[in-house]
Every structure is written in structure tokens, then in C-alpha cells.
Image (cartoon, rainbow, N blue to C red):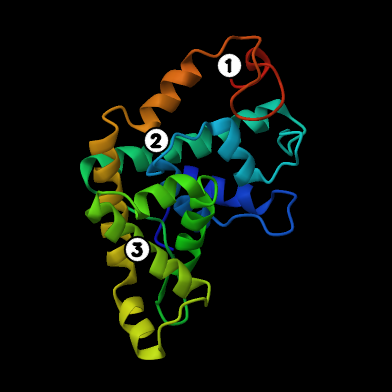
């Protein structure tokens, strides 16, 4: 992984400390947030944050101190907002881990996080795959192929897989940018903007959108 800003290093440490059997790595979180950002349907933070910290059906975050909930939610939301800005500029900058032994980019972890985000709205992604926007469908097909390779579920032979792996990081960035462009054509008000507008209307006595289970005024509000 390239040198990270201190806020991202702190977030990486916080993810590792979550009381989960297999917490997300930072690169997985980055792929997950990117998938949320280009999802064809809006997903509120109260829902997808639970996927990050692995809360149970109660939706309560696994932190004892409300300040920890607020810091963690703010840090994740800040990275999400950064991804949205980069996509709007056409300059997506994924956070990939790198194998220190040979310098290989471990893109598989990132794309697995992206796939987890896709699993939140399978019908929406099916609509993209079968829709009239052929460029979006082709971009999704490219990403789905890489997801299958990363999960050892690809029907391709080894030579074909090697060819796709050689250009995986380029294809990932290109595919995600094309999906972002297609979604912008369909929805001038992007899901990210909708999320922001919805969150801004939450009352102080309403449940906090971070998913902590506390009232907004006693948590992130």
C-alpha cells in the first residue's frame, strides 16, 4: 500500500480493531465505498455502515463510547465523499494493497469490497446489466469478470485469466468511471447528493444515520 495520509492510517487501524472475526481491510473498505458511490440505487449510510462494522440486526455499532462511533462514521464518510469527488473529476484513486515481497498490486481485495457493495442492491445491478445503456453494461461485465477471477470462480482458462490480471487495475478504474458516467446520465442528482440531502433533514430526536442506535442529537448530530 502506498504511503497513506494519517487519517487513513488511523482508519486502517480502527478497522483492524473492530471486534469481528474478519474485519474489512482498508483496501476492501475502499472498494466497498466505491461500489456504494456508483450504485444505480441510492443507499443510505445507516444501511451500508452496518456492512462496514458488521453490526447485528439491532444496527448498533460495536463501540462503547459514542465519540468512537462518531469518529469512525465521520472517517468512513469522509473517504466516501473523497471517492465521489474523484469520480466527478474523472480521477478515481483506489487504495490498493501491494505485496511487499514482489511489488504486485493486490487488486483482488479491493474488488471483493466492491462486490460486497453490489450485493446490497442486486436487482439494481441486474437492471444495468440488462438495460439499454450498452456502455454501462459492458463496464459492469468487465468488473464482474474481475470479481469472478478474484474469487476463483472464473470459467476462463489460465492464459485468459493472466491477460485480464495484467491490466486489472486499469480495467477497474476505467469500468468504475464508466459506471459513474452512466449513472450521472440516468440520475442528474446522484445517489451521493440524495444521501446528503436526506441526511440533512434528519431531526435531532431521530435515529442517527450512522446506525449507532442512538438519537441524532446524542451521536453524530
Nearer to us in this view, 12 or 6: 12
Would you say the residues marked 2 and 1 are in contact, meaning their CB atoms lie under 8 Å apart?
Answer: no
Give the percent coordinates (x, y) of residue 173. 30, 58
When the figure is inspected, residue 115 is found, relative to residue 74, above or below; the finding is: below
Please tell me which of labels 1 and 3 falls first in the chain: 3
In front: label 3 or label 2 = 3
Q: Is residue 50 left or right of residue 185?
A: right
Look at 40% across and 25% down and name the residue there: 194
Question: What is the secondary structure assignment of the residue under circle 2?
Answer: helix
C-alpha span from label 2 to label 1:
18 Å
Residue annotated with mark 2: 81
Nearer to us in this view, 196 or 136: 136
Look at 40% across and 69% down and name the residue there: 146
C-alpha span from label 3 to label 2:
26 Å
Look at 71% across and 41% down and name the residue there: 55
Q: Is residue 187 left or right of residue 55?
A: left
When the figure is inspected, residue 16 is found, relative to residue 171, above or below; the finding is: above
When the figure is inspected, residue 162 is found, relative to residue 221, above or below; the finding is: below
Residue 221 is marked as 1
Query: For residue 65, which quarter of the picture?
Result: top right
Q: Residues within 10 Å of mark 3 (few under 14, many from 20)?
A: some
Look at 29% across and 45% down and name the residue there: 180
Question: What is the secondary structure assignment of the residue under circle 3?
Answer: helix
Nearer to us in this view, 26 or 120: 120
Please tell me which of labels 2 and 1 falls first in the chain: 2
Placement of the N terminus among the 4 image quadrants: bottom left
Residue annotated with mark 3: 141
When the figure is inspected, residue 220 is found, relative to residue 7, above or below; the finding is: above
Amino acid at each position: 500500500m502506498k504511503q497513506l495520509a494519517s487519517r487513513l492510517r488511523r482508519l486502517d487501524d480502527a478497522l483492524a480493531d473492530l471486534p469481528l472475526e474478519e474485519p474489512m481491510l482498508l483496501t476492501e473498505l475502499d472498494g466497498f465505498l466505491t461500489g456504494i458511490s456508483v450504485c444505480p440505487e441510492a443507499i443510505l449510510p445507516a444501511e451500508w455502515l452496518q456492512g462496514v462494522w458488521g453490526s447485528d440486526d439491532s444496527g448498533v455499532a460495536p463501540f462503547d463510547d459514542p465519540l468512537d462511533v462518531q469518529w469512525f462514521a465521520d472517517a468512513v464518510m469522509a473517504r466516501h465523499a473523497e471517492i465521489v469527488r474523484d469520480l466527478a473529476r474523472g480521477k478515481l484513486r483506489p487504495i490498493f494493497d501491494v505485496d511487499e515481497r514482489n511489488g504486485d498490486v493486490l487488486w483482488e481485495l479491493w474488488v471483493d469490497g466492491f462486490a460486497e457493495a453490489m450485493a446490497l442492491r442486486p436487482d439494481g445491478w441486474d437492471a444495468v446489466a440488462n438495460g439499454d445503456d450498452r456502455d454501462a453494461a459492458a463496464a459492469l461485465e468487465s468488473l464482474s469478470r474481475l470479481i469472478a477471477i478474484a474469487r476463483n470462480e472464473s470459467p476462463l482458462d489460465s492464459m485468459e485469466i493472466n491477460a485480464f490480471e495484467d491490466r486489472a487495475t486499469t480495467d477497474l478504474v476505467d469500468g468504475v468511471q464508466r459506471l459513474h458516467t452512466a449513472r450521472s446520465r440516468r440520475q442528474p442528482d446522484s445517489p451521493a447528493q440524495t444521501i446528503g440531502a436526506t441526511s440533512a433533514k434528519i431531526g435531532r430526536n431521530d435515529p442517527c444515520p450512522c446506525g449507532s442506535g442512538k438519537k441524532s442529537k446524542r451521536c453524530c448530530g
